[in-house]
Amino acid sequence: MQHQLEVLADGDAVARAAARFVADRATAAVAAGGGFTLAVSGGRTPWVTFAHLRQLDVPWERTVIYQVDERCAPADDPDRNLAHLRAALGDVPADVRPMPVEAADPEAACEEYAASLPEFLDLVHLGLGPDGHTASLVPGDPVLDVADRLVSLTGDEYQGRRRMTLTYPALARARQLLWLVEGAEKRDALTALLDGDRSIPAGRVHGDASTVLADRAAAGDLAG
């Protein structure tokens, strides 16, 4: 798919631009349909983005936030994306829908979370790993081949944890994808993503539209 690339000076500039992008999309979605649905991945940049976003005019009361992926860990575990998300949001009155990774039957929990997803997601935030992974769609994992479910568990541990993740069919429900990419170690993966290289997991993601906000370190020669 085609990606619109914007190169910014550094990580903070990426986070600020991302906050403005989310705020604009939220306002437009609420004006058009009365509500805004957002799915958020883990990583440092989205938490900085939310810190900036809290300073902007966002229709939080009409915003529903889903998780793109989550580590299978106890509620109080510092590895959990949810803990960082809640801390970054502070007291804003958004409706946060956590992935049920603590459920006794995680496979059934995946089905329940899938049933809670809307037909379309107004905006899906994604990161990009140096290995080309996005969400918890990591190289070589059986989850890459899941085509009949919207939410799935990874088959293997990644960085010490199994994950619950939105699958490619779920990400395809995105009206808008927003990729946040920082750091020189991401340069090869970013080039592959922009080239539509399906050999990396991120290269197989599709949505109605896609915007990539990258810092100069990640963009390299792509910065022009």
Image (spheres, rainbow, N blue to C red):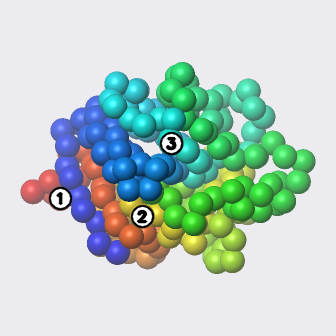
Q: Is residue 158 above or below residue 173?
A: above
Q: What element does badge 3 sit on?
A: strand
The residue mark sitting in front, 2 or 3, is: 3
Q: Residue at x 27, y 49 (%)?
A: 214
Q: Position of residue 20 (x, y in %)?
A: 29, 39
* Number of marks drawn: 3
Residue pushed farthest right? 104
Side of 51 where 154 appears, left or right: right
Q: Can residue 192 be spotted in the picture? A: yes
Q: Is residue 116 above or below residue 72?
A: below
Q: Earlier in the sequence, mark 2 or mark 3?
A: 3
Q: Position of residue 210 (x, y in %)?
A: 34, 63
Q: Which numbered tag is attached to residue 222?
A: 1
Q: Residue at x 75, y 39 (%)?
A: 73
Measure the C-alpha gap from mark 1 to mark 3: 34 Å
The residue mark sitting in front, 1 or 2, is: 2
Measure the C-alpha gap from mark 2 to mark 3: 15 Å
Q: Earlier in the sequence, mark 1 or mark 3?
A: 3
Q: Residue at x 56, y 69 (%)?
A: 168
Placement of the C terminus among the 4 image quadrants: bottom left
Side of 210 where 108 appears, left or right: right
Label 2 neighbourhood size at 10 Å, few (<14), some (14-19), many (20+)?
Answer: some
Q: Which residue is mark 2?
A: 175
Q: Which numbered tag is attached to residue 73?
A: none
The residue mark sitting in front, 1 or 3, is: 3
- Three-letter code, disc 3: Thr
Q: Which residue is mark 3?
A: 63
